[in-house]
Structure formats: C-alpha cells, structure tokens
Image (cartoon, helix red, strand yellow):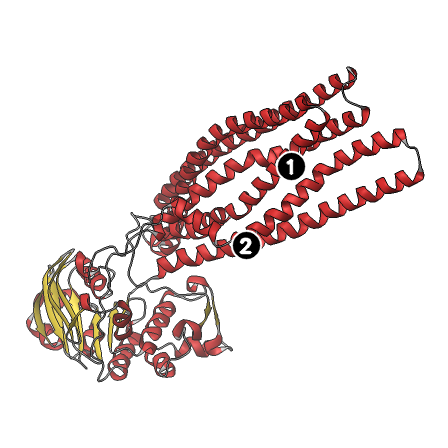
Amino acid sequence: MMTTDTQRPRPGAAILRTALRRNIGAMIAGTVLMGLYQAAETAFPIALGLIVEHTMQDRSLGSLGVSIGSLAVIITTVSLSWRFGMRVLQKANTTEAHRWRVQVAACGLQPVARDVDGLKSGEILTIATEDADQTADIIEVVPLLVSSLVAVVVAAVALSLADIRLGLLVIVGTVGILSILAVMSQRIGSSTQEQQAKVARAGAKVADLIIGLRPLHGFGGNHAAFGSYRRVSTDAKRQAITVARVNGAYAGTALALNAVLAAAVSLTAGWLAFEGRISIGELVMAVGLAQFIMEPLKMFSEMPKYVMIARASAERMALVLSAPPVTVPGPERPAPGGDLEVDGVRHGTLRGLKFTVVAGEFVAIAPYQPRAAADLVAVLAVNAAPPAYEGVVRLGGQELADLSVEAVREHLLVNPYDAEIFGGTLRTNIDPSGSSRTLPEAVEASMLTDVVALHRDGLDYAVRDRGANLSGGQRQRLSLARALAADTDVLVLHNPTTAVDAVTEQLIARNIAKLRRGRTTLVITSSPALLDAADRVLVLDEGVITAEDTHRNLLAGDEEYCLAVAR
C-alpha cells in the first residue's frame, strides 16, 4: 500500500463553492421568487402613497376599486412568491445538507481510516450533522441576500423619485450599516468555529462514556469520567455563552442602526413635506418605506453572520473530507482459503512477532499481556495499516500491503471482544445483509439458542441500541454468532467467551471447532476450553512467540503457562 495522498485538498471555501454550484438552478429560481416577494413588499407602501395622492385629487368609486384591486394583486404576489420561493430554497438546503452528511459519513465508514488530526467518532458525528446543516444554509443565504438587496434598491429608487436626498440617505445608510456589521461578523465566525470544536469534543466525550459506561461502573471510575465530561461540557457552555453575547451584540447593533436609518428617512421626509418639496402622498410613501425597509435591512445585515457560520462549518467538514487515507490499498486479491502468516511484525508491544496459521487449521494464541493481544488484533484488522508497523502480514501468500482492503475484509474477519451491537433484531445483528447460508448453525454454535427460545419472536426479537436489553453474555454470544455466520475463509476471534459461564464456554469451544473444521481459525484467548479445542497453542509473551504445543502438553510441561491460563 502506498502512502502518497492522491486526493486534492478541499478547503472550506471550496466546499461552499461546490454547494453553490450544484444548486445554481434552485438558487436562481429561489432568488427570482424571493426578489419578487421583496419587490411586492416594497410596492405596498409605494401603492399606498399613490392611492393617497390620487384619491385626494379624484374622489371616485372607480379609483377606489382600482386601488383595492392593486393592493389585492400585491398581497397575492407577496404570499405566493414567499411560499414557493422558500419551498424551493429549503428543499435545496435540506438536500444539500443530506449530501454532505452522507459524504462525511462515507469518509468515516471507509475501510481505510483517514488521518483526521485526532478527531474522534463523536466529533465526526457532530460534523456530519450540525456542520453539514449549517454549511448547506449558504443555499438560502445567497438568494435572501440578493432579494433583500432588491428591496433596498427599489426603495431607494422610489424615494429618489420623490426627492434625491431620500434615496441617497437610504443608499449611504445601508452601506454604512453593512460596513460596521461586516467587521463584527468576523468575530462571530472565529467564535462560532471555536464553539463548534468544543461542542464536538463534548460529543466525542459522551460517545466514549457511553461505550465504556459498564466497565466504568465496574471499577468505580464513573465519577471521575463524569467529572472529565463536566469540564469539557463547561468549556463548551462558556464558549456558547461567548458566541451568544457576540450574536446579541451583533443583532442589537443591527437593529439599532436600522432603526436610526428608518427614523432618519421618516424625519427627512417630514421635513421635506413641511417645506412643501414633496406631496402628502409622497410623505405617506416615504414613511411607509422607512418602516418597511427595516425588515429587508435586518435580513440583509444578518447575512454576513450566516455566511461566516457556514464558512466555519465548511472548514470543519474540510478536516474530514480533505484528510488523506492512512494508506492507499493495493489492487490484488488473496487466494481463497489461504494461510495467515505474520512475519517479523513490530507494533506497540509486539517485538518481531512471527507465526503461521496453515489453511484449515484451528490455532489459539495465549497472550500473557493483554496489550500484546490488542496490538496483534489491530494489525490483523488493518486498524494499524502496514506503514504503521514493521514486518509483513500475508494472507493467502499475498502481503496485506498489496491487497485491496475490501478483499481483506472479504477473506479475513477479525471479531473484537467489544464488537458493537446495533438496534434492530437478533436476525439483523447476526446477518445484516440477509445473505448468510449458515445462520442456524452460527446461532447454535454460539449457544445463542436459549436467547432465541426465550422470546416469542425468536430471531425477530427486537434488540435495543448497543444491546441495552441483553446481558453481557448474550451480547457476546450475539457478536460471536455474527462472526460465525459470515463464514469467512480466515476468522480471528479475540476473547469471544469472557462473559459466559464455564459450562457454556466448553460447549462454545467445541461448537466453534466443529463448525470451522477445514476453515482457517485463529482465537486469541486465555480460555482453557478454547485453548484445549485448538489444534495447537502459541504462547505470546513480551511481544514474541515463546512456546508452541497443544494445550495439554503445555499444561503438563510449562508451569508459567499453567499459572497464566488455569482457572
């Protein structure tokens, strides 16, 4: 596997450009409809001014009817353009957020891990949800920004027709307001990015706590863990308060400036009417526009803030999407039913580990140090990619570095002791794809039959998320059944029976040996039952294989082995 990064970086700005480019049609339609809405809204006070102007000159029922009809058309246009404009934009927004969520999730679920600068799964979850949603908001922000600009321009033109000073006042005031708020929005962007990072870290801490809650309770470490989460959550809360203060200052400043501009337009129009330079109808129009213009100005002034938030979220998504894979898989595939060979592997506590499991053999490894077992599992599961360790692992005579990870997963299954249990049913947990041909045999071999028989729904019994309605032993047997049902050429089991009683463990050991006869099986365990069922046992001590024989021969001639595995 090569380590060269062949993926082009995708910074936050590029993510925003991509979102805008592939929604250009919806944004144009939304901009037209929202621009029509703002223009119709602006036309309402203009129409009122004209009605007042003409009514005072021509007091007839016909003029009144035309005026009422004109207002009805304007109101209908306002209602329909808003409804359909927002429908178009929100559909595009929701669809775009979904696309980014799927893309971030796909990066997290790829068979080769990505170098995401220490981001944990909880942080990636936050990026795939909140940051994806906030990034997609740019789809609505741009059309609303343009439509608000349309309202300001129409109002400025209408006021200029009455008196050029009113139009200039609106234009100059708008430019001044936006200049002030643009400076403030920079602070919002940086504060929001920091807040999102701290919230994501708190989410990651929660995910870690949920996964380790039971063992934490077991040795009394739950209070210390909760205290750690409290500190992380408190940091996120303080940053959220800071962001809220900045947003409050921004919103208050925008509202105050907009109110000052509206008051300035109203007072100037009143002074011009008093001087006789504009008519009463134009005064009504100017005052109406001064009141109306506060809404588009408010929307217009808030857009820089949302742009900065979207930019900050896009930058966080770029951390995941632009991260290079730890390795680039090779193109080869292993020979079916091949050997598993570990040759001189140095990783973590492993010190030149070397052994071979011949095709069709059932081998057990008895690790004297749990950390060495975990390091070996990481290597075999390709969680530690070939560049991360020295030595070679071969599957079917082919080096893992030369194999595609999909091919490795297809031929080699490593089942960890803490395998995840998903919400669904017993059946969907054992056979997620619904294609297993050995499901009944796997259920029987893992001794899950009593769990199936215990419930009226049998294999369709509902399982809660993380197996919350199952005992520890039931969860472990369910995980083992899933591994056996996969029926892969090479199966590696790590401590598959630590949570079951001795009698059940004996039965499971015999069943595994029987079901996997003729298939390559490696069990990393200190269970006497599984060690006895294996064709041979390898003793893993201080990162190397120090002894090799059958379980019973080792018991008879190796005192240290007796002490390590005897129960």
Using the image, determine if residue 261 lies above or below residue 552: above
Quadrant in the picture for residue 408 = bottom left
Residue sitting nearer the eye, 446 or 320: 320
Residue 522, given in percent of the width and then of the height, sits at 20, 73
Residue 446 can be seen in this image = no
> Do callouts 1 and 2 mark residues in contact (Cβ within 8 Å)?
no
Using the image, determine if residue 440 lies above or below residue 276: below
Quadrant in the picture for residue 215 = bottom left
Residue 81, given in percent of the width and then of the height, sits at 68, 49
Residue 232, given in percent of the width and then of the height, sits at 38, 40
Residue on which disc 1 sits: 151
Residue furthest top as drawn: 275
Residue on which disc 2 sits: 25
The kind of residue tagged 1 is: Ala
Question: Would residue 370 appear left or right of 543 to someone viewing this image?
Answer: right
Residue that appears at 37% across and 65% down: 472
Q: Secondary structure at mark 1?
A: helix
